[in-house]
């Protein structure tokens, strides 16, 4: 509990979603075995027996559990003075998991087709996710003041300022900073998206600087399930039922690499 309270990554406190995830792993899978044991009494055999009892059919969760325990005990071993002599988590590769899904980026045609199969208020969202490689939490926190578009139709230019994101916690939606310092950035909008974005601002976004670009029907932040309900139908109609929303971000990286 003390470790979780004070844990920092690169000098920054844990994100709320990360903290909730860690707390769930501790409560459900780590504390039942190790919660009542003194740190110094935990042996490598204890760790191996515990790891072998974790559900092998959920390899990602299993790796997360082991990685969390290893990190906590590593902190104990590296403290001054050390709380334990050595970290008993020494199972090679246990904290890693083989990627189950290898994303296949969408083509330019597929991005365009999926966007036009979506409800009109979400078309610009698909285009920004793909061509500007924006995360879902960044898109759903975008506001009118974060968009700068040129007024000239014959020389379309645009910039999206990414300075915030939003996550869904047990208490509801919460504004947060991007995942890393590098996540705070200015993203150039490709010229062919500028007219789409300009039309979206005129038709679907309130006039106030703080108006959300992609609000839910109730005016607050858009829930993933609401968007995915439409996205799953659109991707199926385009013949890409394998495409996940986050794969649009991979698509953006792929398009950026292709264009240099």
Image (cartoon, rainbow, N blue to C red):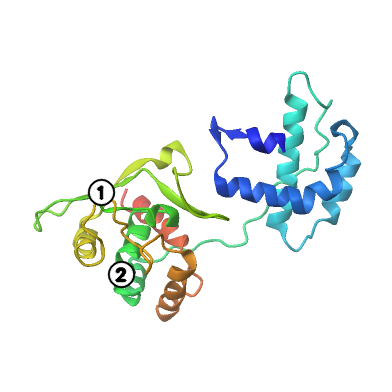
> Is residue 96 visible in the rendered structure shown here?
no
Is 250 positioned to the left or the right of 154 in the image? right
Q: Secondary structure at mark 1?
A: helix
Q: Nearer the viewer, residue 10 or 172?
A: 172
- In which quadrant of the rendered image does the N terminus lie? top right
Counting from the top left corner in percent of width and height, residue 101 is at 58, 62
**What residue is pinned by disc 2?**
121
Q: Secondary structure at mark 2?
A: helix
Quarter assignment of residue 38: top right
Q: Residue at x 41, y 81 (%)?
A: 237
Mark 1, residues whose alpha carbon is within 10 Å: few (<14), some, or many (≥20)?
some
Is tag 1's residue or tag 2's residue first in the polypeptide sequence?
2
Counting from the top left corner in percent of width and height, residue 231 is at 43, 72
Q: Residue furthest bottom?
A: 237
Q: Residue at x 76, y 54 (%)?
A: 28
Mark 2, residues whose alpha carbon is within 10 Å: few (<14), some, or many (≥20)?
some
Quarter assignment of residue 163: top left
> Is residue 215 visible in the rendered structure shown here?
yes
The Cα atoms of the two marked residues, 1 and 2, are separated by 18 Å
**What residue is pinned by disc 1?**
145
Q: Is residue 151 above or below residue 237?
A: above
Q: Residue at x 39, y 45 (%)?
A: 164
Q: Nearer the viewer, residue 229 or 3?
A: 3
Q: Nearer the viewer, residue 37 or 198?
A: 37
Is 221 positioned to the left or the right of 27 in the image? left
Q: Are marks 1 and 2 in contact (CB under 8 Å)?
A: no
Counting from the top left corner in percent of width and height, residue 248 is at 42, 61
Counting from the top left corner in percent of width and height, residue 201 is at 22, 61
């Amino acid at each position: 509990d003390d470790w979780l309270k004070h844990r920092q990554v690169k000098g920054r406190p844990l994100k709320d979603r990360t903290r909730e995830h860690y707390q769930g792993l501790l409560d459900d899978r780590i504390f039942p075995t190790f919660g009542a044991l003194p740190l110094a009494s935990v042996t490598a055999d204890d760790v191996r027996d515990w790891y072998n009892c974790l559900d092998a059919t959920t390899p990602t969760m299993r790796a997360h559990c082991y990685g969390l325990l290893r990190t906590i005990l590593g902190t104990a071993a590296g403290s001054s003075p050390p709380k334990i002599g050595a970290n008993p988590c020494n199972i090679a590769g246990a904290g890693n998991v083989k990627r189950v899904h290898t994303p296949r980026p969408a083509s330019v045609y597929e991005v365009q087709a999926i966007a036009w199969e979506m409800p009109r208020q979400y078309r610009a969202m698909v285009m920004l996710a793909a061509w500007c490689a924006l995360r879902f939490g960044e898109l759903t926190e975008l506001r009118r003041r974060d968009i700068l578009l040129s007024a000239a139709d014959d020389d379309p230019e645009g910039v999206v300022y990414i300075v915030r994101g939003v996550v869904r916690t047990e208490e509801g939606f919460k504004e947060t900073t991007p995942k890393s310092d590098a996540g705070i950035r200015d993203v150039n909008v490709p010229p062919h998206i500028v007219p789409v974005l300009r039309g979206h601002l005129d038709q679907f976004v309130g006039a106030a600087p703080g108006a959300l670009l992609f609000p839910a029907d109730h005016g607050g932040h858009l829930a993933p399930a609401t968007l995915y309900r439409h996205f799953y139908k659109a991707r199926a109609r385009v013949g890409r039922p394998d495409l996940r929303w986050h794969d649009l971000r991979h698509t953006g990286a792929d398009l950026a690499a292709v264009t240099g």
